Every structure is written in C-alpha cells, then in structure tokens.
Image (tube, helix red, strand yellow):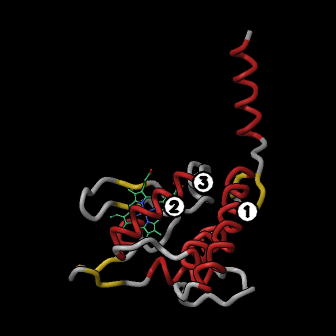
Amino acid sequence: MKKPYLLLALVGLIAFPVHAEGNISAKQSEVMNKLLAIYAEKARVEKKEGKGQGVVSGKSFTAAVGREFFLVRRTWQRHDFTCSGCHTDDPRKEGKHIEAKVPIKPLAPSANPERFIDVQKVESNFTAHCMDLYGRECRAYEKGSFIAYLMSVK
Ligand code: HEC
C-alpha cells in the first residue's frame, strides 16, 4: 500500500511545487539563507583580521559584487581562470569542465533543484574551486556575494 501513496505525493509535488522565492525551492532558500548568515559572520571576522577585501561592515551582500566575482578573469600560475570558464557566463545554463570536458549541471538554484541543498557540499565545492582558481580559500565576502547573485538569477 505504500507505493500508491508515494506516487500521489510525487504527483502532488509536480502539480504544486513549493516555491519560496521565484523558482527557488523552500529547501534551497533555507540552505542559502543559512550560508548567507554564516558568511556574514565570517566576513566580519575576516575584516578585523585585515583579510576581507571590500567588506563594508554592516552592509549585506550584493548580487552585483557576486556577479563580478563569477565573471572576472584572474591569472594564476600563468593560466587565465574564471568561475564562468566551467559554469558559463549564465549560471542557468549547463556548463562544461575546461579540462575534463564533462558537462556540469546549471549552478543557479532556479535552474537546478539539486544545487544548494547541502551546506557541506557547497562549502567543499567552494574550497575546491577557489583553490583551483586562486590557490586560496575564497573570502566569506566573495562567497556571500556569490550566493546573493545566484539567488537573484531567476
Ligand atoms: C574547472 C571547472 C570549474 C571551475 C573553474 C569552477 N567550478 Fe564550480 N563546479 C564545477 C563542477 C564540475 C561542479 C559540480 C559538482 C557536482 O555537481 O557535484 C561545480 C559545482 C560548484 C558548486 C556547487 C553548488 C552545489 O550546491 O551543488 C559551487 C558553489 C561552485 N561550483 C562554485 C564555483 C565558483 C564560485 C567558482 C569560481 C571561483 C567555480 N565554481 C569554478 C567545476 C568548476
């Protein structure tokens, strides 16, 4: 008797998706807001330590800063790198790994319900990609701004 109920529940989900903001699911909204709170706190600490370039204390993250962070090219170890190199200029689109050439599902939560549903997963991706690109962890200010940008992409 379990299966028909499950099927009904699935049909219900498709017919009445729960949307918190735009096309972002309630779960994504919860995880992303949690990340924003974590990064806001860390950004304050980083600023005090003199590491938080661009942090304006008391100001919340802005999508424009996050967009720039995503698109801006940086040269590191003589290579030209950008987040959008793998994720494309439009985070709603499917990307492609610059080296492995494998497709990467869209980053924008509005385009991919599997993104930003796990704080730990987001953090480990940030760590890996920031190390790849900058040879360091990204600042809380950069990560927070990036999340704000992705939340603004409808
Ligand atoms: C060399 C290719 C490459 C570059 C450059 C790259 N990424 Fe990624 N990124 C990936 C791949 C592959 C995944 C998918 C992993 C998965 O689907 O589990 C991913 C996933 C992510 C996720 C995971 C979101 C989630 O919850 O699933 C975040 C956040 C992310 N990237 C941020 C960035 C940022 C920020 C930059 C620039 C600093 C960046 N990436 C640059 C390849 C890249």
In this rendering, does residue 84 appear at all?
yes
Q: Position of residue 136 (x, y in %)?
A: 39, 73
Nearest to viewer (mark 2 / mark 3)? 3
Classify the position of ligand 1 by quadrant: top left, top right, bottom left or bottom right. bottom left
Q: CA distance from mark 2 to mark 1?
A: 16 Å
Q: Are marks 1 and 3 in contact (CB under 8 Å)?
A: no
Nearest to viewer (mark 2 / mark 1)? 2
Q: Name the quadrant containing residue 36.
A: bottom right
What residue does disc 2 label?
107
Other-residue count near label 3 (Cα within 10 Å), few / some / many at <14 / 14–19 / ≥20: some
Residue pictured at 58% horizontal, 80% vertical: 46
Q: Position of residue 132 (x, y in %)?
A: 33, 68
Q: Element type at marker 3?
A: helix
Look at label 1 and name its amino acid. Gly
Q: Element type at marker 1?
A: loop
What residue does disc 1 label?
22
Look at label 2 and name its amino acid. Leu
Furthest residue toward top? 1
Nearest to viewer (mark 1 / mark 3)? 3
Other-residue count near label 2 (Cα within 10 Å), few / some / many at <14 / 14–19 / ≥20: many
The label shown at residue 131 is: none
- Say if 52 sits above or below 28 in the image: below
Q: Quadrant of the C terminus?
A: bottom right
Q: Earlier in the sequence, mark 1 or mark 3?
A: 1
Q: CA distance from mark 1 to mark 3?
A: 21 Å
Q: Position of residue 114 (x, y in %)?
A: 57, 48
Q: CA distance from mark 2 to mark 3?
A: 14 Å
Furthest residue toward left? 78
What residue does disc 3 label?
119
